[in-house]
Amino acid sequence: MSKPTTRTYIPTRNSHPRRQLIGQRRKLALLMAAHNEELVIGATIQSAIAAGQDPRDIYVVDDNSSDVTRQIAVSLLGEDNVLSVERSGKALAIQKAVKHFRIESRYIWLHITDADSVFAPNYFQEYRKKLNARKYAVAVGFVQSMRGNWLCTYRALTYTFSQHVHRRIQAWLGMISVFPGPITCFRTDIFSKLEFGSHSLTEDFDITLQVHRKKLGNIVFIPRAVNYTQDPQTLSDFIKQNLRWQRGLFQGIKKYRIGLRPQRIDVSLGFQMMQMVVFLLQMSILIPIIITTTGSWLIIPVWFAADVAINGLIAIWASIVARRWNLLSALPYFHFLRAIEIGIYLWAFVEVVLLGRFKDEVKGWATEGRRYKLTSEAMADIAAK
């Protein structure tokens, strides 16, 4: 397949061909950044339209794709709504698109999403109910894993619990700790205050910390606006994705000096880190002390049995809430994957905080080679939600 012609972004005074009267702003634009997303971008765009987003208000920025990503987007949205740029990385590509399409002057809100994100049928209806520009600067929906293999089942379980419990509490306390890539909407008047050219492995986390540090406004969580995302299909990709997330976490913690300022985000992230510290102290100090004091190893099976019981109750609850009973099948390997995630967390801490690695700018895309074409059955399953 020959490489498609790339239209390099060159800003001009009349960049966007369509005209709007001054003062007339539409409510919501949807922007997706894409690089080699030919397997999924068509389904993403079609699901957004089916979920209530007007095609006129959907935009794609193609970050120098070598496949037919651009052609698919143009066939669905037209030339005017698709921009191709030189290789920039996701965050900078978004910034270029916002300027090119004059999003700030033409829209009140901008929803940014990933090219593999399939929207539930009521997604934008639920979003528009909550988009009160006087009250909120940012809105976030609910991200869920698509049905798939054992890794997707594990992710669906953890997503369901973390968002229905942790994120609801964070939202109530005004301390949401990350704006996930597929489900975040920004009031456009805060865009000029955000820096998208940051040297971060997780641009969504960096932007989250900027909103908190600069006190740009309140954040609303919209749990009924569900977006289904593709998760890794192999253990290797699962590990790579988690490494990027945890390295980006500690990049942001260092950069914004989390824990050293009296803001709610410091409390939120501090609590998350404290949970890990308590767990490690429990495993490395408390349990050994109990074993030494009592002379019995029974504390280990008792502790493990209690943990399994608690996770079993969580899995049952999550299965009911998500209406996915197969989440219970994640229990046999739950502790295996959780142990991997804990190891990755500690390794990323050593790399970023202690050794000072990953300071250089990263323009790559972490999804290359990880996408898979959605089946009609998968799309029908989402449409039925």
Image (tube, grey):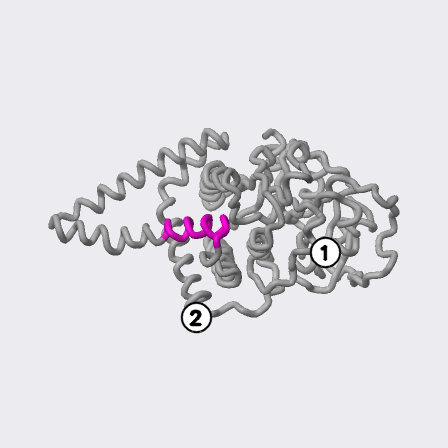
Does any portion of residue 44 appear in the rendered image? yes
Q: Amino acid at mark 2?
A: Leu
Task: Please give the range of residues in magenta.
Answer: 262-276
In the image, residue 199 above or below residue 371:
below
Residue in view at x 41 percent, y 40 percent: 330
Residue projecting furthest to the left: 295
Does any portion of residue 234 appear in the rendered image? no
Q: Amino acid at mark 1?
A: Asp
- The quadrant in which residue 367 appears is bottom right
- Residue 355: image tag: 2
- The quadrant in which residue 317 appears is top left
- Image quadrant holding the C terminus, namely top right
**Between disc 2 and disc 1, whose residue precedes?**
1
Q: Is residue 324 magenta?
A: no
Q: Of helix, strand and loop, which one carries label 1?
A: strand
Mark 2 closeness class: few <14, some 14–19, many ≥20 residues within 10 Å: few
Q: Is residue 269 magenta?
A: yes
Instruction: Answer whether labels 2 and 1 touch (C-beta < 8 Å).
Output: no
